[in-house]
Image (spheres, rainbow, N blue to C red):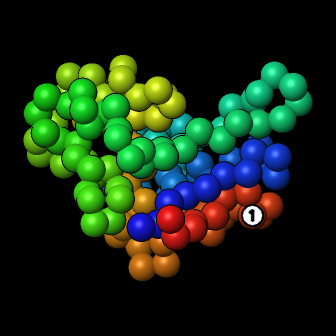
Amino acid sequence: MKRIFIDPSKCDGCKNCSVACMEAHRRDGGSGVCTLDLTDPANVSRNRIVTDGRGGYDPIFCRHCDVPDCAGACMSGALKKNQTTGLVEYDEEKCAACFMCVMSCRYGVPAVSADRKRMIKCDFCVHLEEGPACVRACPKKAIEVREV
């Protein structure tokens, strides 16, 4: 199983990871960050960078937990732990938009979509052959994928 690991001491708050995530998941059919509308609420990153209050940054990413609180709270079965890949997978068709997952995650990762009809969380960029866009976009190599 592969997981994303973060070294917050290397993060300089550039948010390249967030923009790369937005680009990788855009629904408007465009391509390239130069055409990405960062003000469009439909373009949402599945990760975020917050200040730590001490002059540094805390990258907030889905940990695809071994025992995910989000999946445990999901009454519709839209979130499930894939025991083979180790990823917490989301089925938008099953989502009841109750957002119990958002309230249950101890890391504050899942978010409500702008239209309030679905939740947003990391999918490990399974649709991209080259892996998670955030990892490739980090100039400081603060984010990496490791086998666990």
Question: Is residue 107 found left or right of 104 in the rendered image?
Answer: right
Task: Pick out the residue farthest to the right.
Answer: 55
Decide: is 139 above or below 118.
Answer: below
Residue at (66%, 58%) from the top-left corner?
Answer: 143
Decide: is 104 above or below 137.
Answer: above
Q: Amino acid at mark 1?
A: Lys
Q: Nearer the viewer, residue 33 or 25?
A: 25
Residue at (63%, 64%) from the top-left corner?
Answer: 144
Query: In the rendered image, is residue 147 in sight?
Result: yes
Task: Indicate the position of residue 81 as horizontal and vertical percent values.
Answer: 27, 50
Question: Is residue 126 found left or right of 62 in the rendered image?
Answer: left
Task: Indicate the position of residue 17 as horizontal and vertical percent values.
Answer: 63, 54
* Quadrant occupied by the N terminus: bottom left
Q: Nearer the viewer, residue 26 or 29?
A: 26
Q: Quadrant of residue 47?
A: top right
Q: Which residue lies under the disc numbered 1?
A: 141
Decide: is 84 above or below 42.
Answer: below
Q: Residues within 10 Å of mark 1 (few under 14, many from 20)?
A: few
Residue at (66%, 41%) from the top-left corner?
Answer: 59
Residue at (26%, 37%) from the top-left corner?
Answer: 71
Q: Nearer the viewer, residue 54 or 81?
A: 81
Query: In the rendered image, is residue 32 in sight?
Result: no
Task: Indicate the position of residue 36 as horizontal and vertical percent values.
Answer: 53, 54
Task: Indicate the position of residue 103 as horizontal and vertical percent values.
Answer: 36, 20
Label 1 sits on a secondary structure element that is: loop
Decide: is 53 above or below 148.
Answer: above
Q: How many marks?
A: 1
Q: Quadrant of residue 27?
A: bottom left
